[in-house]
Image (tube, grey):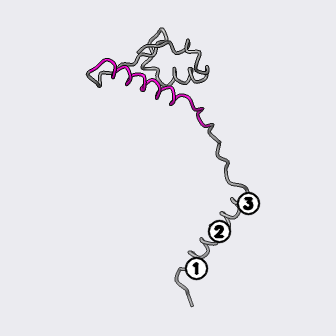
């Protein structure tokens, strides 16, 4: 099965671009997506297999990728709390030493 990806007007342009990006190894210089199948003994079954493969590739490229949300650092108040807790833990550890009478 061969079809020109950018000439497939039944797909939105952004889906065609994602398909070009995701399946770059299966697309030649002219822009044709090439798929083949030799699973079955008959040509008809192989054609059905190739069409289902093409459909799965298109469905895989169809949804928009999720936008990554940048993580925000901890607030100043949280930093202050952490610093205070660390100081208290240090005091506790410091007090574990030997006691001189």
Residue 91 position (above or below residue 69): below
User: How dense is the environment of label 2, judged by Cα within 10 Å: few (below 14), some, or many (20 and up)?
Assistant: few
Q: Quadrant of residue 99?
A: bottom right
Residue 95: give its label. Answer: 1
Q: Which residue is depicted at the point 59% across and 15% down?
A: 9
Mark 2 or mark 3: name the one nearer the start of the chain. 3
Image quadrant holding the N terminus, namely: top left
Look at the image and give the residue range highlighted in magenta. 42-66
Which residue is tagged 2? 85
- Binning the other alpha carbons within 10 Å of mark 3 as few (below 14), some (14 to 19) or many (20 upward) gives few
Q: Position of residue 50 (x, y in %)?
A: 39, 22
- Based on the picture, tell me whether residue 59 belongs to the magenta stretch: yes
For image coordinates 46% across by 20% down, the residue present is 24
Where residue 77 appears, as percent x and y from the top left, is 73, 60
Query: Which residue in the structure is indicated by mark 3?
Result: 77
For marks 1 and 3 on the same chain, the one whose residue lies earlier in the sequence: 3
Q: Quadrant of the C terminus?
A: bottom right
CA distance for labels 2 and 1: 15 Å
């Amino acid at each position: 099965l061969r079809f020109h990806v950018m000439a497939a007007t039944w797909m939105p342009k952004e889906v065609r671009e994602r398909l070009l990006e995701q399946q770059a190894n299966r697309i030649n210089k002219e822009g044709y997506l090439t798929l083949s199948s030799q699973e079955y003994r008959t040509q008809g079954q192989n054609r059905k297999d190739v069409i289902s493969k093409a459909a799965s590739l298109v469905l895989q490229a169809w949804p928009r990728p999720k936008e990554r949300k940048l993580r925000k650092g901890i607030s100043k108040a949280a930093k202050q709390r952490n610093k205070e807790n660390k100081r208290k833990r240090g005091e506790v550890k410091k007090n574990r030493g030997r006691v001189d009478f």
